Image (cartoon, helix red, strand yellow):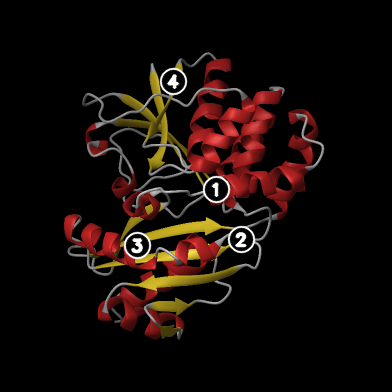
Amino acid sequence: MLAVFGHLNPDTDAITAALVYARLLTRQDVEAQAYRLGDLNFETAFVLREAGVQAPPLLETLPAGTAVALVDHNESTQSLPNLSELTVTRVVDHHKLGDLSTAQPPYLRFEPVGSTGTILLKLFREAGLAVEPLEARLMLSAILSDTLHFRSPTTTADDQEAVAFLAPVAGIEDVTAYALAMFAAKSDLGDTPAETLLRMDYKVFPFGELTAPQQWGLGVIETTNPGYVFGRQAELLAAMDAVKAEDRLNGVLLSVVDILNETNRTLVLSATEDKVLREVFGAAVSGQVADLGARISRKKQLVPALETYFTPQN
C-alpha cells in the first residue's frame, strides 16, 4: 500500500492533494492511502465538512523502506522525520526542488502553478479519467485556497481554467461566495492557542551555506480579520520566541496576510529579524511589526528574496 501525504502543518492543498492523488492512483490500479502530517486548520476542516469526507489518518512515522508519494512538498524539513529512510516513488508538487534524493528513479511532476490541485486535474485528463464531483470539489478548494481566489501572484491561467472547469462538476454555482466562506472559516480563530496559530501554516527553510545553513521558521496567517490577530500580538511574539528556542532556529517570521486588502504585516521578534526585513525588503518597522506591502506569497515573494540574501556572493 502506497502512503500518500502532504507537508507538515498541512493546509488545504496538502490535505486535499493527498486525498485526491490517492483516489487517482487507486483508479489506476495502484493501491494507495492518504495520510496527513498534522492537525487540520479551520479552513481545511470546513472544506472537508462541506464535502462530507473524513480527514485522512494522522501519520507520525513509517518503517524504513516504505513506499511513499509526496504531494505539495519535497523538502525533508517539511516531511516525515525519517523521509531519507523511505522509498519515494512519486512527487507531485508546485514548489521549488529542495533536498530530495532517491535510490531509484521516481515519478516527478513539478509545475509552476498556484496549487497542487491544478496539477492533479491535468493528471486526471492525461489518464483519460473523468473527474468525480468529490474530487472536483477538493481540487477546486485547494486552488482557491492557495491562490487566495486568484489574488496571489502565484496564480496562473492554468489555475483559473481549472476552477472554471471544476466548479460545475463540483456543483458549486457561486465560486466567489464559496471562496469567501472558506476564508471566513480560516479567519474564525476563536481562542486558539498562540503557538497553534503560529504553526498552522508554518514551514522551516534552510538559507545560505549548504553545509551549515541558517534555519528560519516562516509562518503565515491568512485572514479577513487581521485586527483579531494583532490584538494577540504579545501572545504571538511570546510563542515565536519559544518556538525559535525549541526548534533551534536563527529567525522566526509570522506574516499576517489581509486576504481582502492583499497586504502583509509581519511580526518582528528581535533585532535579528528586524535587520533582515529592513535589508531584504526595505520594510518599515514599527512596534515590532514590519510593513511588507503587497508581498502576500511566501513561496514567490518572501522565500526567494531571503534565499538570495543569505546566499554567499562569489
Q: Are marks 1 and 2 in contact (CB under 8 Å)?
A: yes
Vertical order, 25 against 89 (above or below):
above
SS category of the residue bearing label 3: helix
Quadrant in the rendering for residue 167:
top right
Mark 4 or mark 3: which comes first in sequence? 4
Quadrant in the rendering for residue 309:
bottom left
SS category of the residue bearing label 1: helix
Mark 3 or mark 2: which comes first in sequence? 3
State the separation of the CA atoms marked 4 and 3.
Answer: 36 Å
For label 4, the residue is 33
Image depth: mark 1 or mark 4 in front = 1
For label 3, the residue is 236
- Identify which amino acid the numbered label 2 is placed on: Ile
State the separation of the CA atoms marked 2 and 4.
Answer: 33 Å
Give the x, y percent position of residue 2: 39, 21
Residue placed at 45% from the left, 68% from the top? 302
